[in-house]
Image (cartoon, rainbow, N blue to C red):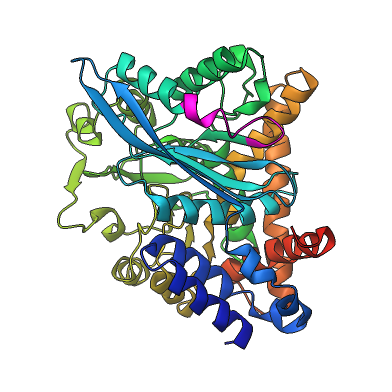
Amino acid sequence: MNSYIQRVLEETIAKNTTEPEFLQAVQEVLTTIEPVINAHPEYEELSILERFVEPERTVMFRVPWIDDNGKIRVNRGYRVQFSSLIGPYKGGLRFHPSVNLSIMKFLGFEQIFKNALTGLPIGGGKGGSDFDPKGKSEVEIMKFCQSFMTELQRHISHDTDVPAGDIGVGGREIGYLFGQYKRIKDVYEAGVLTGKGLGYGGSLGRTEATGYGLVYFMRELLKANGLGDFQGKTVTISGSGNVAIYACELAQKSGANVVAMSDSNGCIYDKNGIDLALIKQIKEVKRGRIKEYLTKHPEAEYIETSNGKKGIWEIKTDIALPCATQNDISLEDAQTLVKNGVKAVGEGANMPTTLEAIEYFHKNNVPLAPAKAANAGGVATSALEMAQNSMRYAWDKERVLTTLNGIMTNIFNDCSSACDTYGLGNNYVAGANIAAFRKLARVMKEQGVV
């Protein structure tokens, strides 16, 4: 390993010993950009890597709120403003019990590269809370969102930091957050949040954007690797949230047979093809568990998650789309997928494949679409929503999705070009990291010591 990379990696590990997810993200990037660092020895003198791995600002705050029984609850809130090199901080808010500083920093770090790949003027950030919306009433969720925004509003604006949704933060939560921001600031600043409702500045196509973007990217990957397209392919998708649902929708429209989806409790295997309308009813309307699928499709099979073992990756498939959460595919899962003949993997979630699993896929010539490239559709369309808000004008859905398709195609081409330039074959993980890093490092150098 390049001595400069080795030193920065060791220093980062020493400074962040209790943050495994963040260190995993840093290691993945630093170990793949070595060709660029070798070609630019001046980057060490400019401390480019040291500046990359340290957030510009990290905010932590308490979020007190009152539940339906009158009891005061307290959660922890975060906003990691990682990089404003090419635009205002941009990245989602996640409400989930697993949220901690490590996860926020890993997501913010990933967001820098993802946003740079879109070609749009947006920096990288991430935020959220360890609040769990599941099992909470509408009133409790509203109260929490209002308390969370009461603090967050100090740190955001349409020119400073523009949050969006993520796990646990959908249109409902964005609405409550935006209402509280408007109430406190006494200004209608539509561009301060994205993922808004269509009635108050949201963009058509934003709901579908991340899932559709994943499929757009995978179409290019399949074609470039001589694998045809989605027509007739078997697909398994982990997760059943927004990304998974709309990846499933476009994959089905593209001729694929999506046979499995999951949630944290287990997965549904329906060899006849997933009934997506039913999944939407269970998850988007009832907010229930995926096992309820069996009430209308008793012929399907439910495989419960047991001791951390996820049955979805044991199902024979041509294309695996992990769209749930980080570290969803372990080395053991990768070995099972390869044994069962998987042809390609597309990351719809953030960092859903462990480093060992990524290496195993590469060794077995299974092309993998990395999250920072393949799931950039959501943030790209958020940036398009910001543009519409600035113009006080709304685009039609066809224009949004056509623009998104072009963005995702360009991202794939940039990743592929980097692979060609540095002789990386179809290692799109390295290609994505290099394509984004080259752009960001150049801007960092041009802006001086900031």
- Image quarter of residue 399: top right
Q: Position of residue 74 (x, y in %)?
A: 29, 31
Location of residue 141 with respect to 105 vertically, above or below: above
* The one of 354 and 220 positioned closer to us in this rendering: 354
Location of residue 329 with respect to 46 vertically, above or below: above
Residue furthest toward the right?
Answer: 446
Q: Position of residue 46 (x, y in %)?
A: 75, 73
Question: Can residue 229 be spotted in the picture?
Answer: no
Quarter containing the C terminus: bottom right
Quarter containing the N terminus: bottom right
Residue 158 drawn in magenta: yes
Question: Can residue 328 be spotted in the picture?
Answer: yes
Q: Where is residue 217 in the image (x, y as percent from the top left)?
A: 61, 51
* The one of 37 and 368 positioned closer to us in this rendering: 37
At x 77%, y 24%, the residue is: 390
Q: In this view, does 125 lie to the left or right of 106?
A: right
Q: Position of residue 225 (x, y in %)?
A: 60, 67
Residue 414 drawn in magenta: no
Q: Main secondary structure of the magenta part?
A: loop
* Tag count: 0
At x 29%, y 57%, the residue is: 315
Q: In this view, does 98 lie to the left or right of 234?
A: left
Q: In this view, does 334 lie to the left or right of 125?
A: left
- Image quarter of residue 444: bottom right
Location of residue 273 with respect to 439 vertically, above or below: above
Location of residue 34 with respect to 163 vertically, above or below: below
State which region is magenta. 149-161
At x 32%, y 59%, the residue is: 316
* The one of 159 and 281 positioned closer to us in this rendering: 159
- Image quarter of residue 397: top right
